[in-house]
Image (cartoon, grey):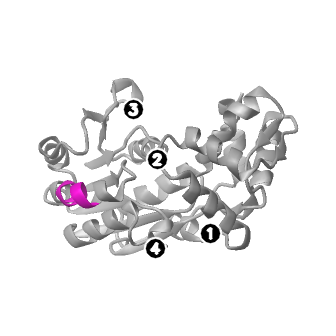
Amino acid sequence: MILVTGATGKVGRPLVERLVDDGHKVRAMSRSVDRADVPEGVEVIAADLLNLDTLADAADGADATFLLWPFSSPEQAARSAPGVVSALASRSPRVVHLSAHAAEGNPDSFWAIVEREVEARAREWTQLRPVGFAGNTLMWADQIRAGDLVRWPFGAARRPLVDERDIADVAAAALTGDGHAGQRYVISGPELLRQDEQVALIGKALGRTVRWEEPSRKEAREQLRVSLGGFSSPHDVLDAWESFIAHPEPVTTTVADVTGTDPRSFATWARDRAHLFR
């Protein structure tokens, strides 16, 4: 039995599907999950991660747990992660945590705080540290639906964006297989692409040309204030993107090493998700 928290999210949903396809029993947990969200045969639990009694019940009997921490505040992580991780780890011997590549360089981030709790409390743990998600480019969807121009900052910023399905495949391997305990897997796509190149590939998937235009930093800050919804600071995000011009995230072989299958390209992701930009 595998417990998947955040089961309706960008990684949780394909993870549930992968585990079911591989013949595993799955317990899907999310605040908003319902029967229609998951494949037939999956046990559904609609619960909040911070409800420790419900969380412990959800983890009871689970051989492994996939942990998605949904809160971006470091203060929230420091306050709540010890109880949450204890509730999971006391019932489930293996915890696979969806962290981020940024955790390594930012020990005060919520990712790093939760990582430390997982490593201190779980009998077996694996940290998944993906770079930027391919699905984050959906922040351009409204502009692409409205026309053939994306106005966004730092078109020269390069990233090896990772398909969320590849993260799910690595997670499935760590949850169900041996040899992953104590690993910190940095997960990336197969190639570095500039942001303006990503937009061009989305346009190609749609069968039309989509152009890139650079706004001022002030305009970009206001765009981000809306699109981020308070999850991250616009200043921090802009600084991070600017840094990717000269210092992009690493391209790794983790997906192939762990799953035996090459990672999906961003062009493949764009073709498969083109309907989301129409």
The residue pinned by badge 3 equals 38
Residue occupying the point 47% across, 62% down = 100
Q: Earlier in the sequence, mark 4 or mark 1?
A: 4
Q: Nearer the viewer, mark 4 or mark 2?
A: 2
Which residue is pictured at 15% across the width and 40% down the height?
54
How packed is label 1: few (under 14 Cα within 10 Å), some, or many (20 or more)?
Answer: many
Foreground mark, 4 or 3?
4
Q: Which residue is mark 4?
A: 104
Range of residues picked out in magenta: 78-85
Residue neighbourhood size for the residue with mark 3, other residues' Cα within 10 Å, grouped as few (<14), some (14–19), many (≥20): many
Between marks 4 and 3, how big is the CA–CA gap?
33 Å
Give whichever of discs 1 and 3 has the lower sequence position.
3
Amino acid identity at mark 3: Val
Find residue 215 and name its label: none
Mark found first going from the N terminus, 4 or 2? 4
* SS of the residue under disc 4: helix
Q: Amino acid at mark 1?
A: Glu
Dot 3 lies on which element? loop
**Residue name at image x 80 percent, y 49 percent:** 214
Q: CA distance from mark 4 to mark 1?
A: 12 Å
Query: On the picture, is 252 further left or further right than 142?
Result: left
- Disc number at residue 249? 1
Does the magenta segment cover residue 141? no
- Tell me which numbered mark, 4 or 3, is placed earlier along the sequence: 3
Q: Would you call the spot at circle 2 few (<14 residues within 10 Å), some (14-19), or many (20 or more)? A: few
Question: Which residue occupies the foreground of this view, 246 or 221?
Answer: 221
Q: Is residue 72 above or below residue 191?
A: above
Contact (Cβ within 8 Å) of mark 3 with mark 2? no
Q: Amino acid at mark 2?
A: Phe
Q: Which mark is residue 231?
A: 2
- Front of the two marks 1 and 3: 1
